[in-house]
């Protein structure tokens, strides 16, 4: 499961991801997900960025309901992006599991020079 959780119930991001795969493989007229796939990666990435910015604004405004709503939007658009780019939930999960339990020190990380 994503987020390295051993829960038995389905993780919502995994559910969103599987629904996005299904929508890509079985398009439905009027589907927002299909609209995004039809418009392509640039549109999907634009939406990921917009929604992430809205989460930041909601957090800055300390609006818990809006933080939850906008975070849900980000997770949905990330799921669509993962499907579009061919990155699986298992790929992300493997990275998270590899990071789990590791000691991390900000001084051990290379300085970010390129943005």
Image: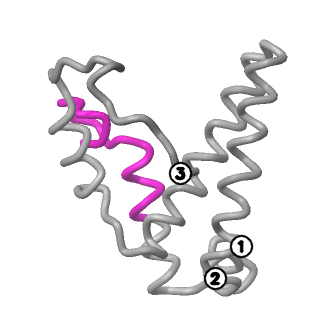
CB atoms at circles 2 and 1 under 8 Å apart?
Answer: yes
Tell me, yes or no, whether the highlighted magenta stretch contains residue 108. Answer: no
Q: List the residue tagged with mark 1.
A: 43
Q: Residues within 10 Å of mark 1 (few under 14, many from 20)?
A: some
Is residue 103 found left or right of 10 in the rendered image?
left
Q: Which residues are magenta?
A: 1-18
13 or 31: nearer the viewer: 13
Task: Please report contact status of discs 1 and 3: CB closer than 8 Å, yes or no.
Answer: no
Check disc 2 and report its element: helix, strand or loop. loop
- For marks 1 and 3, the one nearer the N-term is 1
Residue at x 57% of width, y 86% of height: 27
**Separation (CA) of disc 1 from disc 3:** 24 Å
Q: Hey, which quadrant is residue 41 in on the image?
A: bottom right
Sequence-wise, the earlier of marks 2 and 3 is 2
Q: Residue at x 76, y 51 (%)?
A: 50
The mark found on residue 76 in the picture is: none
Q: Position of residue 96 (x, y in %)?
A: 25, 39
Q: In terms of secondary structure, where does tag 1 sit?
A: helix
Residue at figure coordinates x 75%, y 80% from the top left: 30
Question: Are dots 2 and 3 in contact, CB under 8 Å?
Answer: no
């Amino acid at each position: 499961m994503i987020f390295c959780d051993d829960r038995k119930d389905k993780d919502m991001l995994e559910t969103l991801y599987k629904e996005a795969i299904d929508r890509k493989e079985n398009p439905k007229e009027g589907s927002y997900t299909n609209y995004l796939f039809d418009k392509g990666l640039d549109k999907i990435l634009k939406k990921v960025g917009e929604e992430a910015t809205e989460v930041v604004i909601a957090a800055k405004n300390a609006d818990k309901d809006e933080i939850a709503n906008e975070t849900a939007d980000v997770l949905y658009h990330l799921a669509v992006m993962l499907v579009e780019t061919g990155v699986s939930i298992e790929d992300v999960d493997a990275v998270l599991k590899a990071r789990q339990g590791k000691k991390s020190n900000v001084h051990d990380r290379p300085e970010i020079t390129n943005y």
